[in-house]
Image: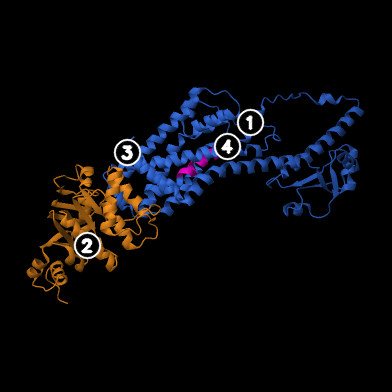
Amino acid sequence: MIEVKAVSKSFGDVKAVKEVTFTAPDHQVTALLGANGAGKTTTLRMIYALITPQTGEILIDGVNPKEHPEKARKLLGVLPDTRGLYKRLTARENIEYFGKLHGMSDADIKTRTEALVEDLRMHEFIDRKTDGFSQGQRVKVAIARALVHDPQNIILDEPTNGLDVMSTRGVRRFLKKEKQRGKCILFSSHVMQEVAAVSDEILIVSDGTIAAQGTQLELQQQTEKSNLEDAFVHIVTAGEDHE
Amino acid sequence: MNKQILTVMFKEIKDNLRDKKTVMSSIFMGAIFGPILLVVMMNAVSGMMKDKAEKQLELHVNGINNAKSFITFVKSQGAKVSSFSGDAKKAILDKDKEAILVIPSNFAEKFESGIPAEIQLYYDATAKGATNITQKRIKSLIKSYSRSIGMIRLQLRGISPSLLQAVTIEDHDVSTAESKGAQALAFLPYFLIMGLFMGSMYLAIDTMAGEKERNSLESLLLNPIKRSYLLTGKLLATISFGIITLFATLLTFKFTLPFMPFESMGINFNFGIKDMMLFAFLLAPLSIMAASLQTIIATFSKSFKEAQTYVSLLIFIPMIPSIILMMVPVKEKLWMMFVPILGQNLAINQILRGEPVSLLWFIAVAVGSLFVGLLLALLAIKLYNRESLLFSD
């Protein structure tokens, strides 16, 4: 479970995130939906302790990442916005490297890698050097690498950005399976379809704040719109969405 | 050592060893570039000196018939004389001739009256190559002719020519064969240090700027590892490439020794296993400094290319002490041994000169370089801990 309480962060004069509060519980897919530059990535980076929040508190299964960054990272699996692989290493070696940094034994890394190869369908390219991989193959390896330690909490920043239909479906199927295993999944996106297809709870992020929150149906009812996109536009423009 | 540090170190070594370009340009090029350049340089210098000193001197003379006895003297000294007509100044500037003698038509008249008769010598003092040797040989030829004529004139007047010599000089050159070798090899420390810098350069760039450019840095920082451990692992990989290249450079140097013109230069220089180990002991501590400096610069660079530009400029820094020591004679003091690069230069030159050097001085060299290297490594770690590391682009 990830708890975010009244968290803020500014870069110079720009207030990127303002007093954001929300909870992403286990057994659920929570989505941060917002336009580019709304503050999604900054919020996520504070959760995985790459940036220190100026106010507020974050707890990951009760651990504050500001005070115990290494302990918090063990509880997290993160697919960040930038997800480059090591091109001269094979997909398997990329995954092994992160497994070792997590302090896993060779046997554990092997078993877990096999399970991830199965779930993400990576048989074809697992032992090839990652130079020249397609976007879809790269994202799959990056997800496997991020989740090699089988964390309880999974954070994904725009996971299906730039992927084709087949790869997108593969990632969605994987996330649904992880949810069934009881994981807490938090992901960000600016794609309505994406959010509508996988998430249970939607948080609409606009200008560094949470503008609205609820299931897709709840958001549509609140705004009296028939689809998520219209509801989203209505919320972020504060009702002034007349074309 | 911490397991995570080792994991990072071995990953970086494996990753970079797979890149043939890195291996070629760091270890291989670093190791052979310096020693081979040294062989080429030494052979060029000794060849040029030998060539000009032993070659028959050729005199181009305008006005041969104006000074017949001089020409006879010159020929008796083994020089070849040829007549020249035309613009002497132009022929020199066009590099047609190295030096030209012009004997004016009033030469014989002045000569016979006992007035100093002049011979004009044209040459270009700024010309490259052996022109200066030619010019000096011609001058000494003219001087010895002038002196022998002068002596005959004095004797004819019943005066002992030795009266002209109030003071004589007796040469006592105390240089040994080793010290001559040291002079010629003054640049050896630089070539060895250069190999070390070249060896670690690519690793420093790849592990820092490369990680940023590949967009793999953020994912890496998300692992439960302290950043100081992460950087220590990367630094150790970089240092190990520097040290491997150092040993390869020393070996290459050993193998190039037979191609050095030591014999013709009168140099006696042995480079045995003991010398090699001693050199390695003196130079290896520099690898920490080199790797840390390169890493710090690469941390600030936005891209691989930018890092490459700045880090390659670093190679010229170790040249400074070598150049200064070549120009200014320095009396070695203990404190100088603690200064990285300067200490290595002084100590290696002492070994080359065959002078006894105390163990204390060798240890001072190693300790000084280690200390500065560790300070720079700490600075690199401190810089790596900044939050802005990710956002410097």
CA neighbours of label 2 inside 10 A, class few (<14), some (14 to 19), many (20+): some
Residue positioned 15% across, 70% down in the render? A228
Same chain assignment for discs 3 and 4: yes
- Which label's residue is closer to the chain start, 3 or 4? 3
* Image: magenta residue range: B189-200
Q: Does the segment drawn in magenta span residue B257?
A: no
The reply to whether discs 3 and 4 touch (Cβ–Cβ < 8 Å) is no
Q: Which residue is mark 3?
A: B3
Q: Which residue is mark 1?
A: B269
Q: Examine the image and state in which quarter residue A131 appears.
A: bottom left
| Vertical side of B134 occupied by A47: above or below | below
Find the distance from the CA under tag 4 to the CA under tag 1. 13 Å
**In this rendering, position of residue B158 left or right of residue A160:** right
* Magenta-colored segment: predominant secondary structure: helix
The reply to whether discs 2 and 4 touch (Cβ–Cβ < 8 Å) is no
Same chain assignment for discs 4 and 1: yes
The residue lying toward the viewer, choosing from A62 and B341, is A62
Q: Secondary structure at mark 3?
A: helix
CA neighbours of label 4 inside 10 A, class few (<14), some (14 to 19), many (20+): many
Question: Which color has been applied to chain A in this rendered view?
Answer: orange
Question: Which color has been applied to chain B in this rendered view?
Answer: blue
Find the distance from the CA under tag 3 to the CA under tag 1. 45 Å
**In this rendering, position of residue A77 left or right of residue B375:** left
Residue positioned 38% across, 42% down in the render? B9
**In this rendering, position of residue A26 left or right of residue B135:** left
Q: Which residue is mark 2?
A: A173
Subunit that carries the residue with mark 4: B
Q: Label 1 sits on what residue type? A: Phe
Q: Secondary structure at mark 2?
A: helix
**Residue B274 point in image, percent of width and height:** 55, 28
Q: Mark on residue B188? A: 4
